[in-house]
Image (spheres, grey):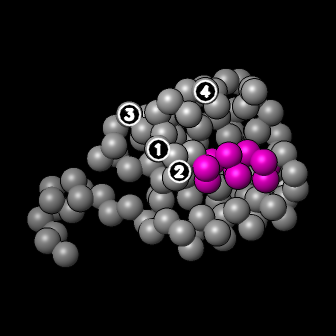
């Protein structure tokens, strides 16, 4: 299944940016570099009409719990704008914001 149609499924750019923010802030953890790389490709693809990543690549490189969430996102994008909004709300409730420990260490912040 190709994912090149995803960029056309959003109500407007703000909705696409909200989805991208969830992927960036809550799913793409750079402590898991391979997984993060493929989640970032999906993040990029959501705004582009060409293929950065395939579902097969995501399946091979993203752990099952996050892959299930991404598959729900893909279905939501292909179903309705309201389903996308519901996906954002559910993902925000399910996944906490990833704390950037590298930035915190470099800035001298221990908290």
Q: Which mark is residue 56?
A: 4
Q: Which secondary structure, mark 1? A: loop
Mark 4 vs mark 1: which is more N-terminal? Answer: 4
**Marks 3 and 2: CB-CB under 8 Å?**
no
Q: Position of residue 67 (x, y in %)?
A: 57, 45
Q: Are marks 2 and 4 in contact (CB under 8 Å)?
A: no
The residue range painted magenta reads 68-77
Quadrant the C terminus occupies: bottom left
Q: Is residue 74 magenta?
A: yes
Separation (CA) of disc 1 from disc 3: 10 Å
In this rendering, which labeled residue sits more in front, label 3 or label 4?
Answer: 4
Picture coordinates of residue 89, whole percent (x, y):
66, 70
Q: Position of residue 81 (x, y in %)?
A: 84, 58
- Element under disc 4: helix
Figure check: 17 above or below 39: below
Instruction: Tell me where residue 2 sits by quadrant.
Output: top right
- Residue bearing mark 2: 66
């Amino acid at each position: 299944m190709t994912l090149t149609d995803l960029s056309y499924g959003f109500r407007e750019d703000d909705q696409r940016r909200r989805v991208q923010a969830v992927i960036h802030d809550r799913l793409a953890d750079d402590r898991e570099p391979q997984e993060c790389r493929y989640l970032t490709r999906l993040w990029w693809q959501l705004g582009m009409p060409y293929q950065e990543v395939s579902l097969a690549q995501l399946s091979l490189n993203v752990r099952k719990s996050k892959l299930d969430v991404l598959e729900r996102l893909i279905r939501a994008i292909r179903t309705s704008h309201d389903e996308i909004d519901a996906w954002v709300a559910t993902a925000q409730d399910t996944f906490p914001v990833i704390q950037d420990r590298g930035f915190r260490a470099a800035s001298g912040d221990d908290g």
